Amino acid sequence: AQSVTQPDIHITVSEGASLELRCNYSYGATPYLFWYVQSPGQGLQLLLKYFSGDTLVQGIKGFEAEFKRSQSSFNLRKPSVHWSDAAEYFCAVGAIDSNYQLIWGAGTKLIIKP
Amino acid sequence: DVKVTQSSRYLVKRTGEKVFLECVQDMDHENMFWYRQDPGLGLRLIYFSYDVKMKEKGDIPEGYSVSREKKERFSLILESASTNQTSMYLCASSLTRDRVFGSGTRLTVV
């Protein structure tokens, strides 16, 4: 079955510390991979995406993610978090041959300690 | 700046009412989507549309219908609202795979 797992419901990180949010997927075909961020009371904003090529992808707001096919993972990283990064983060997987299908993780809520 | 606009941020409706949630995009995107967001469940697709007057069921279409009479507008209709439809509703549009989301409508059915 196709699925996306974000193992951490909540993560608490001190401001200035590094961050890694985990995303594992189960998908039969070649996947397209996305990370979105949702600030409180807002819609979702695309952080970055992977379609092909270099497996280390740079996104907005200083985020990056690495696609590891052997581990079926697409973890999101940031070297130094800011209080404004407090939000909920969603990983999603799409089919290479479809514009419509996206499978979403349940989200990870990031809490920043001052 | 490209935008997806949802007409209401908060709505409170009574059980049994017919509810319309409106969504407008200004990007000339072909595809539009309605999602429901509940804590711990991520986003679940209700319906999507790939062209005017075209619609496809998503994962949880029961109790909902949609209308797309113009390319820029995609409406979600709750035929007879029930308390289990209390949720955050997110509209999105896309040209290919990237979704652009609206700010969401938090619907409470009492």
Image: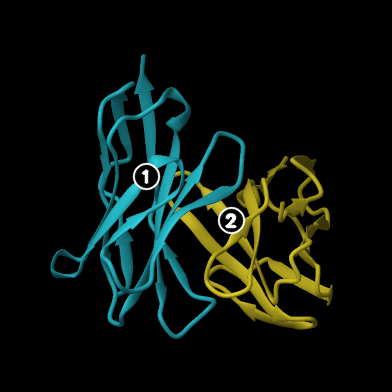
Residue linked to disc 2: B36
A106 on left or right of A7: right
Quadrant where the C terminus of chain B is found in the figure = top right
Provide the secondary structure element on which disc 1 rests.
loop
Residue A45 location (% of width, % of height): 54, 49
In this orientation, does residue B40 appear? Answer: no
Looking at the rendered structure, the number of numbered marks drawn on it comes to 2
Residue sitting farthest toward the left: A70
Residue shown at 52% from the left, 61% from the top: B44
Residue linked to disc 1: A63
Residue shown at 81% from the left, 68% from the top: B72
Residue shown at 33% from the left, 58% from the top: A57
Q: Mark 1: which amino acid?
A: Phe
Residue B19 location (% of width, % of height): 81, 55
* Letter of the yellow chain: B
Residue shown at 26% from the left, 26% from the top: A17
Crowding at mark 1 (Cα within 10 Å: few <14, some 14-19, many 20+) = some
- Chain A's colour is cyan
Q: Nearer the viewer, residue B54 or B29?
A: B29
Q: Mark 2: which amino acid?
A: Arg
Q: Mark 1 and mark 2: span between their CA atoms?
A: 26 Å
Quarter assignment of residue A82:
top left
Q: Nearer the viewer, residue A114 or B23?
A: A114
